[in-house]
Image (cartoon, rainbow, N blue to C red):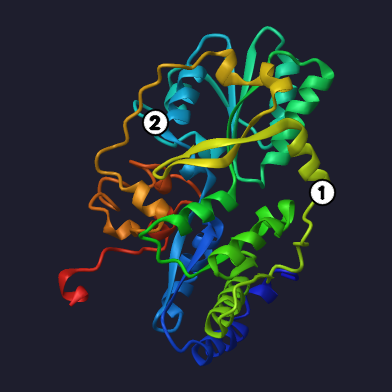
């Protein structure tokens, strides 16, 4: 298939691996930030084909996974209210909260609907003026412009029975938090190409300079990732710490200025809680004060929510990159895609789901030796 197969060419992959072997002279630890990149690395076995010493650390870039448990519980509480139509992307329905998930609310008779764009939720609100329609606005900078446009459109057209439960997070502060962690082992980053397609990469330049870490904007196909890893290793070997763009076919330094303008109009930067990580200052988005009337958290006064992670789930360590799914005693036994204990096993971008779908299993005692 044109424009796809050429990024999956096995001969080119072998050449890139040979260049990596010729370039790397010492061990390096590189984090791919995006969960979509994690799935490609694991599904294609790229992480296992890399030269000895080149270690990939799987980052927190799964928007479903880092949505805090408190927000899932708020979503479940709002969705169960009479007179509410709760809308969301499909992968949010099975993310477990403290006592259940959105799919369970739907099964119990709640009006929970999957939509493919937040503007569909605005349309549903317009068609149901006697109901409150809520959209679960989660994600990184990639989904923020569409969610911003939905709120701005509802405001401009007077759709007052529409609101959003916002849990947007931002990538650069998460990278900074990882680098500030005393236990950090990451020496270079593959930045998420789709985030940078929206925001560009100027935000990453001060991080690369301050922490002396290379950051390479990278796509999602096998050859994208191999080239991104090679570019990162070349920087590390030469002692450089710059932002480079592997994903030149989709990303410009300035990003998409129209999308950025929509985000600036609808949102303000705020402290945000990340599941398994905790509060990160200036790492999220909240509705601008003039649009506070569209904030479902305010409209439904979802206070007093008490949360509790499943005691067996180690999703926090997995999202921080300090543990692998195969380190979890519940992985593949009590926690599977059909019976998930935590968000990383549910999401299409979750690390646990990536490992499970690829058939990865814990090492036996004899294999460890």
> At 41% across and 53% down in the image, what residue appears?
320
User: Number of labelled discs?
Assistant: 2
Kindly indicate the quadrant of the structure image that contains residue 227.
bottom right
Camera-side residue of 312 and 337: 312
In this view, the residue in front, 132 or 197, is 197
Residue at position x 72%, y 29% in the image: 120
**Position of residue 286 measured from the top left corner of the image (x, y, whole percent):** 62, 31
Rendering coords of residue 47 (x, y %): 45, 73
Q: State whether residue 339 appears in this view.
A: no
> Can you say which quadrant of the picture contains the C terminus?
bottom left
- Residue found at x 77% / y 33%: 265
Residue in the picture at 58% in, 39% down: 284
Q: Which mark is residue 8?
A: none
Assign the N terminus to one quadrant of the image: bottom right
**Where is mark 2, residue-wise?**
97
Between disc 1 and disc 2, the foreground one is 1
| x, y percent for residue 248 | 75, 69
Residue lying at the far bottom in this picture: please name it.
22
Label 2, secondary structure: give it.
loop
Quick check: 243 left or right of 62?
right
Q: Is residue 199 above or below residue 209?
A: above
Q: Does 250 sit left or right of 89 as displayed?
A: right
Question: Which of these two is toward me, 97 or 110?
Answer: 97
Work out whether 15 lies above or below 135.
Answer: below
Q: Quadrant of residue 215?
A: bottom right
As drawn, the label of residue 257 is 1
């Amino acid at each position: 298939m044109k424009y796809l197969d050429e990024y999956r060419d096995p001969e080119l992959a072998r050449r890139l691996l040979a260049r990596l072997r010729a370039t790397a002279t010492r061990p390096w630890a590189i984090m791919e930030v995006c969960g979509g990149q994690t799935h490609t690395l694991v599904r294609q076995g790229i992480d296992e084909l890399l030269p000895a010493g080149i270690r990939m650390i799987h980052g927190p870039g799964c928007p479903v996974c880092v949505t805090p448990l408190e927000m899932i519980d708020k979503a479940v509480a709002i969705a169960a209210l009479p007179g509410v139509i709760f809308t969301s992307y499909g992968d949010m329905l099975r993310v477990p909260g403290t006592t259940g998930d959105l799919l369970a609310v739907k099964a119990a008779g709640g009006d929970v609907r999957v939509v493919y764009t937040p503007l569909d939720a605005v349309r549903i609100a317009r068609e149901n003026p006697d109901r409150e329609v809520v959209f679960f606005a989660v994600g990184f900078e990639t989904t923020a412009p569409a969610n911003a446009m939905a709120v701005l459109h509802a405001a401009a057209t007077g759709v007052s029975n529409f609101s959003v439960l916002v849990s947007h997070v931002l990538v650069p502060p998460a990278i900074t938090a990882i680098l500030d962690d005393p236990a950090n082992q990451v020496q270079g980053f593959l930045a998420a190409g789709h985030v940078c397609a929206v925001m560009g990469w100027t935000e990453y330049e001060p991080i690369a300079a301050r922490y002396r870490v290379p950051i390479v904007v990278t796509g999602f196909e096998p050859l994208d990732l191999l080239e991104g890893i090679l570019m990162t290793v070349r920087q590390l070997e030469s002692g450089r710490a710059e932002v480079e763009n592997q994903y030149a076919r989709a990303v410009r330094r300035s990003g998409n200025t129209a999308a950025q303008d929509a985000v600036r109009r609808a949102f303000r930067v705020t402290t945000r809680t990340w599941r398994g990580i905790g509060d990160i200052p200036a790492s999220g988005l909240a509705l601008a004060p003039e649009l506070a009337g569209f904030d479902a958290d305010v409209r439904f006064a979802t206070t007093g929510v008490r949360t509790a992670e499943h005691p067996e789930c180690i999703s926090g360590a997995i999202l921080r990159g300090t543990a692998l799914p195969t380190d979890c005693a519940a992985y593949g036994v009590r926690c599977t895609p059909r019976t998930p204990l935590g968000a990383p096993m549910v999401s299409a971008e979750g690390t646990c789901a990536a490992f499970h779908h690829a058939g990865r299993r814990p090492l036996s005692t004899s294999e460890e030796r």
